[in-house]
Amino acid sequence: MKHISSAIVAGLLVFGSAAVVAAQTPAPTPQAHAQHAGKYGKHAGPGRRGGQALLRGIQLSDAEKANIKNVNAKYASQLKALREQYKSQSQGKIAKGDTAAMRQRWEANAPKREAMKKIMLAERSDIRAALSPANQSKFDANVSKMEQRVAKRAEKGKGHRPGSV
């Protein structure tokens, strides 16, 4: 009986000290949380997720940040409208292996993909114009890297999309 009560007391001490240590650990800062949320959140920039890669390594001034925010706001409604159109048309399920239906959907959405691409390129151009000349060169280097990655991925996945040959 003495051993059981000693084990219980020892267990309570261990769990109690763990709770105290956890309570004393500083909570994550809102800034760290915002950085993570920004990586995948709705304010990531052109293409929403691709924008972070385009601005990697660039220290933005307050004026540049404000200009980029204005550019994103300018294009946000257009991109949202296209996403909603695409989503409403793609609601129906396609049976697994039904390549004809997939090809038909892919071809039907081609104009929307092209429109979205044009808007995103215009947004990228406006963001570049909002940067200082020093930051524009870094931005151009990031664009080049991103285009290389996209081309490499497209080459690797060639033949997997319904519209590809």
Image (spheres, rainbow, N blue to C red):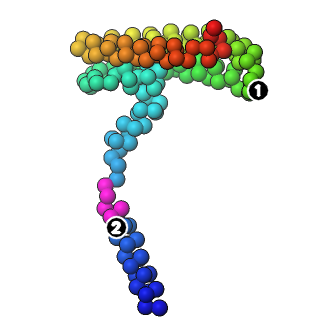
The residue depicted at 72 percent of the width and 13 percent of the height is 104
Q: Quadrant of the C terminus?
A: top right
Q: Residues within 10 Å of mark 1 (few under 14, many from 20)?
A: few
Q: Residues within 10 Å of mark 2 (few under 14, many from 20)?
A: few
Q: Secondary structure at mark 2?
A: helix
Q: Is residue 40 magenta?
A: no
In the image: residue 131, left or right of residue 119: left
The front one of 156 and 48 is 156
In the image: residue 133, left or right of residue 12: left
Residue 79 point in image, percent of width and height: 53, 19
Q: Is residue 110 visible?
A: no
Residue type pointed to by label 2? Val
Q: Is residue 19 visible?
A: yes
Magenta stretch, main secondary structure, is helix
Q: Which residue has dot 2 on it?
A: 20
In the image: residue 82, left or right of residue 55: right
In the figure, 121 relative to 52: above or below? Answer: above
The front one of 83 and 14 is 14
Span shown in magenta:
20-26
The residue depicted at 37 percent of the width and 16 percent of the height is 145
